Amino acid sequence: MRIVHCFRAPVGGVFRHVRDLCEAQIAEGHDLGIVCDSNTGGPHEDRLIAEIAPKLALGLIRTPMQRHIGPGDITASRRTLKALKRMRPDILHGHGAKGGFYSRTFGTLMRAGGQSVARLYSPHGGSLHYDPKSAAGRVYFGIERMLERLTDHLVFVSDYERRTYEDKVGVPRCPSTVVYNGLREEEFEPVEPADGASDFLFVGTMRDLKGPDLFLLALKSVEDKTGRALTATLVGDGADLPRYRQLAESLEFGERVQFLPAMSAREAFRLGRLMVVPSRAESMPYIVLEALAAGKSLIATKVGGIPEIFGPSSPALCMPSADSLVAAMEQALADESAWRKLMPGREALVARFSLGAMARNISRIYQECLSP
């Protein structure tokens, strides 16, 4: 098959998902291509793009894509459609709201021009994070509903994402399937903390959705309640990074809290003993799966698909608030060995969240979409 993955930002879990899919599908003998934004990402993402680009038989196209719908989409759309026509995909798989819009509208235009292409969409959260009562939410969910008519298959990365779609957009009027994110075999090897590792670790994009501010506020409260001078490392890039640095300064952490640029997850895992995922919203976050597979002790918020990994009643989960994080962080600090026992076992993780299973399930969906 000729497969093109289309998405906006080459950062975070969506980019990781696409890279893994590309690697697995190339190994299966398919020709792959990628279309994504040219204005997002930093040196770490540039290195990842440089690694995957030579393997893409259909090429890598980077063009400016705005996060929100705007006048710039007209020019970007023309460039993207032209590039896609040259790629001649059998499968056009859009990821995230912007990628989903492009894959389905452009795939339909290509069909009208005589090209046979299957149009798939994976939300990865995307527009589903909006409040359905807000003006923006009503607009985006209305667009999602209309685009179902141009969709051959919806692929959700968690049951939570499927339920959220049904609640906010409606029960899909096109075929849909839940396929969990998967990890490579080598990612299930444990990673031990380095000498001098911080007490706590955050790894993720620096934006409010991921909760770095909640983490910093909770860390200060834990210090005040325990009387301990704690250390923390925050790894990641993002537009809101300066604001979090300012927050850390206002809380007077000094050198006990350090910010480092984005790096590979397994490299980052060595930098802290207890990892905190304080997200306000998620779909099925890779960072949680990667950390657990590497044997990290984790404190995570009970949002999105995270309870599907731990189990909905796991005491390792807390609400996305500073107060709730404080209680969990205190408990984990008090007895780190006991906290580690709350983590899901390796065998259970391998059975449900392997890259092989993810790739096979998605390939089966592609074949069904191409069947007459």
Image (tube, grey):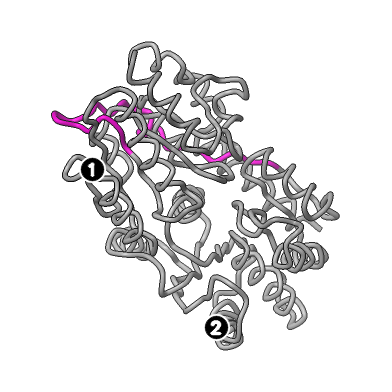
Image coordinates for residue 229, horizontal then vertical, percent? 21, 30
Q: Which mark is residue 76?
A: 2
Sort mark 1 into few (<14), some (14-19) or many (20+) by Cα contacts within 10 Å.
some
Between 197 and 95, the one lying in front of the other is: 197
Q: Looking at the image, tell me whether mark 1 or mark 2 is earlier in sequence order.
A: 2
Image coordinates for residue 244, horizontal then vertical, percent? 34, 54
Q: Which mark is residue 253?
A: 1
Q: Which of the 4 quarters of the picture holds residue 343?
A: top left
Part of the protein shown in magenta: 178-201
Looking at the image, is 168 positioned above or below residue 41? above
User: Among all residues in the image, which is located at the extreme left?
Assistant: 195
The quadrant of the image that shows the N terminus is: bottom right
Taking the spot 82% from the left edge, 55% from the top edge, the residue there is 174
Secondary structure type for disc 2 = helix
Indicate which label's residue lies in the foreground, 1 or 2.
1
Q: Is residue 199 magenta?
A: yes
Is 183 positioned to the left or the right of 114 in the image?
left
Image coordinates for residue 206, horizontal then vertical, percent? 39, 55
The quadrant of the image that shows the C terminus is: bottom right
Q: Is residue 12 magenta?
A: no
